[in-house]
Image (spheres, grey):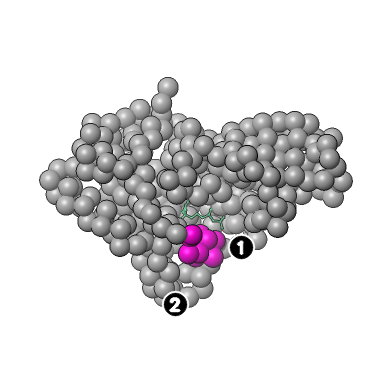
Amino acid sequence: DPVEFAAYAPSNIALSKYWGKRDRSRNLPLNSSLSISLAEWGSHTEVAPSESGIDQVSLNGEVLDMGTAFASKALKFADLFRAGRAQPLKITTRNTIPTAAGLASSASGFAALTRALCGSFSLSLSEAEMSLIARLGSGSATRSIWHGFVRWDKGRAEDGSDSFATPLDVTWPDFRIAIIPVDVGPKSHSSRDGMNHTVDTSPLFAAWPDQAEADCDFIEAMVREQNFTALGQRAEANALAMHATMQAARPAITYLTQDSWAILERLWAARKNGLEAYATMDAGANVKLIFEAQSQDDVTTLFPEAQVIVPFAG
Ligand code: DP6
């Protein structure tokens, strides 16, 4: 029977994006991706047997209605571990990601839930196996099993048995990430709907899988060489290419707002004057910057609202 077990997983930002699935039910990607984990920005999740005898899910201190998307997703995921047995669970999640940062927490959420469920059900799985299971919850969760740089290899097997992530053995103490929050209302489309619609309707998507695979390999090589400029240029190009595939979708999907573009324009102007920082954007309006420690003062002067993350702190 399940026991009480708590786990943590960091959120992550892809430097080379996952965008497009070859199998939508198993979250099998059309291309490999590479991310950097966000250290203490993530999810703390506890799984315990439910004393009341019915499933209970809470998020950030609030017990959720069972109809809530998060609650039903978490319980459906727990069913993978319950395998038909009547084992009511209490799932408690607390996200440490500042709400103002507007970052999705499904990556850290499913990775932490995977770790907590493995512990609760006393399964001694390898981290590679946990990465594979986390993938079933959300593709980006595949990479959130580890800290630091992580590569998710797309794999080839139809059942997804070779589609999991691996941490890169690279420590880069000067590497920095900044989130530049952009104020927006509720998210227009989930990343899941956005990528499926793009795959289905965008004439530009055909060019994406091969280019994204090449970008991923190149970015991995630049991480290993710690060649920041080459890494940053390619990561920014990869993100903009991903957004271009969406803009060509019919109808178009646009996550970036005029505020996002204004931040990019400011960044590009500063780069002409020597600033070494590059941007990446996901299925939302926020802009994320990558840079090295020596550029931090310039970045925070240019963007006072920047929230800086140190991925290799102590
Ligand atoms: C733009 O992992 O949220 O952030 O697999 O459908 O849950 P599902 O999608 P999700 O997509 C993330 C897309 C992205 C790029 C990335 O993180 O690689």
Q: Quadrant of the N terminus?
A: top right
Residue in front for this viewpoint, 227 or 284 = 284
Quick check: 312 above or below 240? above
Q: What amino acid is labelled 1 in the image?
A: Arg
With 258 as the anchor, is 205 left or right in this view? right
SS assignment at label 2: loop
Magenta extent: 186-194
Residue 125 at what x, y percent from top left?
A: 69, 35
With 153 as the anchor, is 296 left or right in this view? left
Residue at the spot x=45%, y=37% of the render?
38
Report if residue 200 lies within the magenta region. Answer: no
Q: Is residue 305 visible?
A: yes
Q: What amino acid is labelled 2 in the image?
A: Arg
Residue holding disc 1? 24
First in residue order: circle 2 vs circle 1:
1
Report if residue 193 lies within the magenta region. Answer: yes
Q: Is mark 1 within 8 Å of ligand 1?
A: no
Residue at the spot x=41%, y=58% of the render?
184
Residue at the spot x=19%, y=42% of the render?
275
Residue holding disc 2? 250
With 218 as the anchor, is 190 left or right in this view? right
Residue in front for this viewpoint, 168 or 73 = 73
Badge 1 crowding class, 10 Å Cα cut-off, few under 14, some 14 to 19, many 20 or more, is few
Residue 170 at what x, y percent from top left?
A: 41, 31
CB-based contact (under 8 Å), mark 2 and mark 1: no
| Real-space Cα separation, disc 2 to disc 1, in angstroms | 20 Å
